[in-house]
């Protein structure tokens, strides 16, 4: 490919493999106690799956610091779990599971209108939309998100603990003097 001329804009291609590699290396390069990093991954996955799109980071960072969890690991895991590609399926499945547990509270059409408002609006409009959802809608989404997020968080914690412990051992072995 030839470089773009001055003032000429290039179309940006979506490359999912590159995105996965990017997040993989961001996680692998994290330093710290394997247990704290794994807790951060598990907590970040849980918060990322519970659909509170505009306020996830505002909730995530203070809670991670309060619970003595690695906030960077939690933020990266939350970003992996909750992004524009997962937005629609995430809300759909949390609504579906939440509606099975708390039946007949919210219609899918109502939730679609809310998602459109969240996608198109600014950050403050998103928070305003969440505040005006009402208890029924919010309870269905939160219950569904918690039911889906808990097993994902537990599995993510144990997988991350294994990976970070293995990486920690390899790093320690490479620094050992004979």
Image (spheres, rainbow, N blue to C red):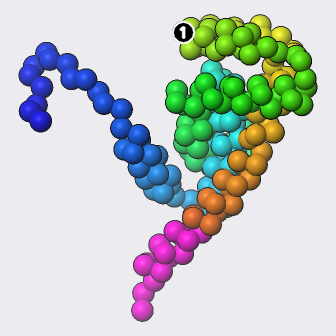
Return the residue at label 1.
120
| Quadrant for the N terminus in the image | top left
Question: What range is drawn magenta here?
Answer: 165-178
Q: How many marks?
A: 1
Residue shown at 54%/75% (left/top)? 169
Main SS, magenta region, reads: helix
**Can residue 122 be spotted in the picture?**
no
Along the line of sight, the residue nearer the viewer: 115 or 67: 115
Percent across and percent down for residue 141 are 78, 25
Percent across and percent down for residue 158 are 69, 60
Is residue 173 rendered to the left or right of residue 41? left
Dot 1 crowding, Cα within 10 Å, few <14, some 14–19, many 20+: few
Percent across and percent down for residue 35 are 67, 61
**Can residue 106 be spotted in the picture?**
yes
Residue shown at 55%/36% (left/top)? 79
Percent across and percent down for residue 133 are 78, 11
Is residue 103 rendered to the left or right of residue 58? right
Is residue 15 rendered to the left or right of residue 132? left
Along the line of sight, the residue nearer the viewer: 107 or 18: 107
- Asked if residue 126 is positioned above or below residue 66 in the image, the reply reads above
């Amino acid at each position: 490919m030839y470089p773009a001329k001055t003032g000429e804009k290039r179309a940006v291609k979506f490359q999912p493999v590159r995105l996965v590699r990017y997040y993989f290396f961001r996680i692998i390069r994290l330093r710290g106690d394997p247990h704290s990093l794994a807790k951060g991954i598990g907590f970040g996955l849980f918060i990322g799956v519970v659909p509170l799109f505009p306020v996830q980071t505002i909730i995530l960072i203070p809670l991670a610091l309060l619970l003595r969890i690695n906030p960077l690991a939690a933020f990266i895991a939350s970003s992996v779990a909750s992004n524009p590609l997962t937005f629609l399926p995430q809300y759909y499945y949390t609504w579906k599971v939440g509606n099975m547990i708390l039946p007949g509270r919210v219609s899918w059409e109502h939730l679609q209108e809310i998602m459109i408002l969240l996608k198109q609006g600014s950050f403050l409009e998103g928070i305003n939309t969440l505040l005006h959802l009402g208890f029924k809608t919010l309870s269905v989404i939160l219950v569904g998100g918690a039911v889906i997020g808990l097993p994902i968080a537990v599995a993510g914690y144990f997988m991350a603990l294994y990976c970070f412990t293995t990486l920690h051992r390899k790093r320690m072995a490479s620094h050992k003097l004979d």
